[in-house]
Image (cartoon, coloured by chain):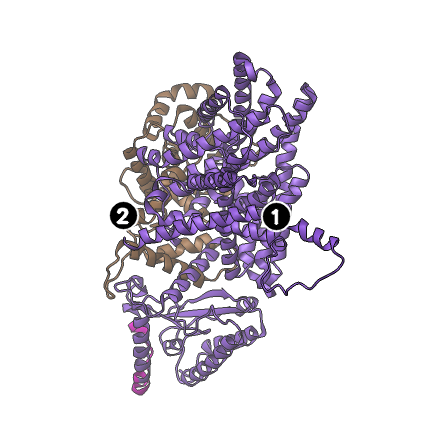
């Protein structure tokens, strides 16, 4: 524990230094502006140029001011983030978002104390630069299965729940203002409704920040999170509606109807725009096999364009971004290389992390900076009403929803959903966007208070509450192949049972969609043979790859004792002995020697549980060197096989399966690493066939490899040669030979 | 015969309802479907189920049909399979797919999960010996992949081998190289599928309202 106090001291010192730097930067911005004027004046004044000493060191800050300040801010934000994790006790009790807001408050306080103008959370900055990465990260990695299974519930909460919140809050605030009178008397109904619509929306950034750390079960997470994403459409419509109407002053029935139509246009339009860009992105990724390096950029740019295009038409940008990510993802992942996939994942996580940090810090800074108009009644009533309306909304809606759900929501679930309705920076920015209005500062203060209350109080207490109520947590185990097999099995089983029952339920339509996807969409959007690959096989390949990578990372000499191997599950080949063909003694000896050698090799490999005997690191230099080596190996093996085979009769015992794992390299070469199973002992080698197969072909025989399938997977002419070799091999194997 | 029959069936319906947990309305709807499938007979045979169009594209069609005729799913301890089943057996098989209700305790949910897992296990264990051997599991994977185009038997074998390996590693992590893992027993099966939460997944919506009149004649 000794280093950590020291580390925390160091980090505190660094943070202080940075904050001072930041303050100086904004101060010098003023000074530099002042300093700019005088040299010009001086230069203009004196026509006689007398020689100045050559400036060895000069200060030229303006030139780099903007990028310098931006970088300094981001650096500060990230160092704060680092710092919190160094101080262990704090980060377990207080969620990161709260700490960041506090830091923002401090920095804002500093800046104000110096007398400078602190940068406020500008709405362009927020909506165009800070928000999209977070939403894209959320949308791209949205767990599709729980989302689609609960989409009805999520939509009801998002649309009806938000509408209820907005109107209830607006109405109640108006009543309170009327009752209270005094400074609040001037607040009219429409302004209250506008206020209600801003404050009622659950914020995805805050929800993500808090729920990320508490690891509750998938269902609750997707309910709250999905709601926070989908309520954007409602918020956009209500906000614009009431903003327009506050100008006009009155609302007619026609306007209300138009509002409803507008809602459908905004939401469905947003989704459509997103889906179009998503399909474009997927289609583009089909052709990127030769330019792997820019693949991630396509994903990011198409998504950002989807967001911006939706914003142009006042459609819901968030829904567009989500739709784009969700549509693009399965096809892009099938097309891009593994490295691109990792890049996409890490860049998205990185950007969203930075954005989130910056948002919370700016929230703190703007709180200190902004003009405030504190009115006890208004603020307190707002906070209380937020809570009350949320609880009422959730309970009431759950009562209705439970009638339609197969698996009902319990009281505990309802509580978490209600308590997790956090407000955040979106509400604040929307308030900021309000036209200058007599009540604007009042509203802003109230919004900030609500945001602080939900993030601090609810954010901090939700973790102990989750523990207290023993809410189910997320299961940490990663997907196993058994689970995948049974998930698919269940899907088909339930669809079948629905068919027997005779009604078209949820599973029937899902099955239809999957079939449509497989038959038409995948052909267009996925390159090469992977378009016809069933999901089970792609899952299996992915799993293989992951394990292979783990092996490479841990070093293939890692010995893991006592692991189960194929020997244990393959039935003992007692019966095979009977059918061993009669061969000469000498030959038998030779074969036995080869077998023993192979068995020893494979047993060693098995003990170390190496799934792939990687003689070369496949992730380093996947280009011509590797294929050359393969050719050399191939040639050697061909020769060995020829010499063995011509003297040995072929007997078809058990078809040894041939396993293939595909690695896609950056240069588009598909490497096939095959393994051949031989009488219960798995022997794996780099290369199209293993050397043991020729010896074992006495007892077993590799099945005639399907050349057509293989030829489809080879992308280069190295592949052609390989298939030719395999065809010759299979032809030889099926040759009966001398009896 | 129609209207009066439903009156006289009441005690039987009540009995079935208690046994299986369906409501009377749901049982009546299932009965209507049963008669539709059986062509107004008292029992249905495999041919009746094979005629259902909705099952045509289903890769595990045969296993599903088998499951209806499997005696083990009747929970009365017998093994083997029926030639024809009556309405009572039909409903008992359907009851495996009921969702849990809010009033269930955790023990009830455990029991329900075990029941559903038992149903799945019986579907895989075709030779009734209480374990799923490698061959049986391989067949399961093959069936799953059967409608997905020309997949070679080697891929199915590889996947099922990997799956068995996983089951063995999770359940018996300290096997000697010479030990032989016989097959997946029911306990091991429960163990590997623990994470899937069968009681919330293996459900279909049983209608409370009769929509059979709304069908355009496609469901048969």
Q: Name the residue under label 2.
A: B187
Please give the label number shown on residue A644. none
On screen, residue A653 above or below A109: below
Nearest to viewer (mark 1 / mark 2): 1
Q: Give the left or right position of residue A649, taking residue A23 as reference.
A: left
Location of residue A491 with respect to A190 vertically, above or below? below
Residue closest to the eye, A562 or A306: A306
Label 2 lies in what chain? Answer: B
Q: In this view, does A680 lie above or below B143?
A: below
Res. A621 visible in picture: yes
Q: Can residue B220 be seen in this view?
A: no
Where is residue A231, by image quadrant? top right
The percent coordinates of residue A212 (x first, y second) are 42, 43
The chain drawn in brown is B
Number of numbered markers: 2
Q: Residues within 10 Å of mark 2 (few under 14, many from 20)?
A: few
| Magenta-span inclusion, residue B89 | no
Which secondary structure lies at badge 1?
A: helix
- Tell me if residue A38 comes above or below residue A286 in the rendering: above
Tell me the distance, in whole angstroms, between the alpha carbons under discs 1 and 2: 50 Å
Q: Residue at x 63, y 56 (%)?
A: A284
Question: Secondary structure beneath disc 2?
Answer: helix
On the image, the x and y values in percent for residue B101 come to 37, 29
Q: In which quarter of the image is residue A560?
A: bottom left
- Of residues A606 and A90, the one nearer the viewer is A90
| Highlighted magenta segment, given as a residue range | A577-589
Q: Which chain carries label 1?
A: A
Task: Tell me residue A484's x, y (percent).
Answer: 42, 51
Q: Which mark is residue A304?
A: 1
* Residue B58 horizontal/vertical position (percent): 49, 47
Q: Chain drawn purple, letter?
A: A
Of residues A549 and A1, the one nearer the viewer is A1
């Amino acid at each position: 524990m000794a280093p950590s106090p020291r580390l925390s001291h160091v980090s505190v010192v660094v943070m202080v230094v940075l904050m001072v730097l930041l303050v100086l930067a904004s101060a010098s911005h003023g000074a530099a502006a002042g300093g700019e004027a005088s040299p010009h004046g001086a230069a203009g004044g004196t026509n006689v140029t007398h020689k100045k000493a050559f400036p060895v060191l000069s200060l030229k800050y303006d030139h780099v001011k903007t990028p310098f300040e931006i970088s300094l801010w981001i650096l500060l934000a990230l160092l704060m983030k680092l710092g919190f994790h160094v101080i262990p006790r704090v980060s377990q009790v207080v969620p990161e978002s709260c700490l960041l807001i506090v830091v923002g408050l401090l920095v804002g306080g500093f800046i104000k104390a110096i007398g400078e103008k602190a940068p406020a959370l500008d709405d362009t900055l927020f909506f165009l630069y800070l928000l999209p990465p977070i939403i894209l990260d959320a949308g791209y990695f949205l767990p599709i299965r729980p989302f689609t299974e609960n989409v009805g519930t999520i939509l009801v909460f998002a649309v009806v729940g938000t509408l209820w919140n907005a109107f209830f809050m607006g109405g109640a605030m108006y009543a309170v203002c009327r009752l209270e009178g005094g400074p609040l008397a001037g607040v009219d109904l429409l302004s209250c409704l506008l206020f209600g619509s801003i404050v009622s929306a659950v914020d995805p950034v805050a929800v993500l920040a808090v729920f990320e750390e508490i690891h509750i079960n998938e269902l609750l997470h997707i309910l709250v999170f999905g709601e926070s994403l989908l309520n954007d459409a409602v918020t956009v419509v209500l906000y614009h509606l009431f903003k327009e109407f506050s100008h006009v002053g009155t609302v007619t029935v026609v306007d209300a109807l138009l509002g409803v139509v507008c809602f459908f246009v905004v939401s469905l339009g947003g989704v459509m725009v997103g889906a179009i860009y998503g399909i474009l992105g997927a289609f583009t990724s089909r052709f990127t096999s030769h330019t792997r390096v820019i693949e991630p950029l396509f994903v990011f740019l198409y998504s950002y364009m989807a967001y911006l295009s939706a914003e142009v038409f006042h459609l819901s940008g968030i829904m567009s971004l989500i739709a784009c990510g969700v549509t693009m993802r399965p096809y892009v992942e099938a097309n891009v290389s593994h490295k691109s996939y990792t890049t996409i994942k890490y860049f998205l996580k990185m950007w969203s992390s930075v954005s989130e940090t910056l948002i919370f810090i700016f929230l703190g800074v703007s709180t200190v900076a902004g003009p405030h108009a504190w009115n006890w009644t208004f603020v307190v009533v707002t906070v209380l009403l937020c809570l009350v309306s949320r609880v009422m909304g959730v309970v009431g809606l759950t009562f209705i929803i439970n009638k339609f759900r197969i698996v009902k929501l319990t009281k505990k679930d309802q509580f978490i959903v209600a308590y997790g309705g956090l407000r955040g920076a979106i509400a604040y920015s929307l308030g900021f966007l309000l036209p200058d209005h007599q009540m604007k500062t009042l509203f802003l203060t109230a919004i900030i208070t609500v945001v602080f209350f939900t993030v601090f109080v609810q954010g901090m207490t939700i973790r102990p509450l989750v523990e207290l109520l023993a809410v189910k947590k997320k299961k940490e185990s990663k997907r196993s192949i058994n689970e995948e097999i049974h998930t698919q099995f269940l899907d088909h089983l339930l669809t079948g049972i629905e068919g027997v029952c005779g009604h078209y339920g949820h599973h029937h339509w899902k099955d239809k969609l999957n079939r449509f996807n497989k038959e038409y969409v995948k052909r267009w959007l996925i390159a090469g043979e992977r378009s016809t690959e069933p999901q089970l096989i792609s899952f299996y390949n992915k799993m293989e790859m992951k394990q292979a990578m783990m092996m490479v990372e841990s070093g293939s000499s890692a010995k893991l004792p006592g692991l189960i191997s194929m020997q244990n599950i393959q039935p003992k080949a007692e019966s095979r002995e009977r059918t061993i063909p009669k061969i000469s003694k000498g030959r038998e000896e030779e074969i036995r020697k080869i077998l023993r050698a192979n068995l020893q090799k494979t047993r060693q490999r098995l003990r170390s549980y190496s799934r792939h005997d990687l003689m070369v690191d496949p992730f380093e230099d996947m280009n011509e060197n590797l294929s050359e080596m393969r050719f050399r190996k191939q040639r050697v093996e061909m020769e060995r096989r020829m010499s063995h085979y011509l003297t040995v009769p072929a007997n078809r015992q058990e078809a040894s399966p041939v396993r293939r794992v595909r690695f896609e390299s950056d240069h588009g070469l598909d490497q096939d690493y095959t393994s051949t199973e031989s009488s219960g002992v798995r022997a794996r080698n780099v290369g199209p066939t293993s050397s043991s197969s020729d010896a074992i072909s006495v007892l077993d025989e590799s099945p005639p490899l399907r050349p057509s399938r293989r030829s489809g997977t080879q992308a280069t002419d190295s592949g052609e040669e390989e298939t030719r070799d395999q065809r010759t091999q299979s032809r030889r194997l099926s040759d009966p030979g001398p009896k | 015969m129609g209207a009066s029959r439903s009156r006289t069936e009441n005690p039987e319906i009540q009995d079935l309802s208690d046994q299986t947990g369906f409501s009377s309305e749901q049982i009546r709807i299932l009965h209507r479907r049963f008669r539709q499938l059986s062509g107004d007979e008292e029992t249905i045979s495999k041919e009746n189920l094979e005629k259902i169009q909705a099952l045509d594209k289903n890769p595990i069609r045969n296993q599903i049909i088998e499951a209806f005729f499997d005696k083990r799913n009747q929970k009365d301890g017998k093994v083997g399979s029926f030639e024809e089943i009556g309405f009572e057996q039909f409903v008992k098989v359907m009851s495996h797919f009921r969702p849990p209700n809010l009033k269930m305790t955790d023990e009830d949910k455990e029991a329900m999960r075990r029941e559903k897992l038992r149903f799945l296990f019986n579907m895989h264990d075709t030779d009734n010996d209480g374990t799923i051997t490698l061959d049986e599991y391989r067949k399961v994977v093959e069936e799953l992949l059967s409608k997905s185009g020309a997949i070679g038997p080697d891929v199915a074998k590889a996947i099922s081998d990997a799956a068995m390996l996983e089951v063995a590693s999770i359940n018996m992590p300290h096997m000697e190289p010479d030990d032989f893992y016989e097959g997946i027993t029911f306990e091991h099966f429960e163990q590997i599928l623990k994470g899937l939460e069968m009681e919330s997944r293996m459900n279909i919506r049983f209608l409370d309202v009769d929509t059979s009149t709304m069908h355009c004649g496609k469901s048969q």
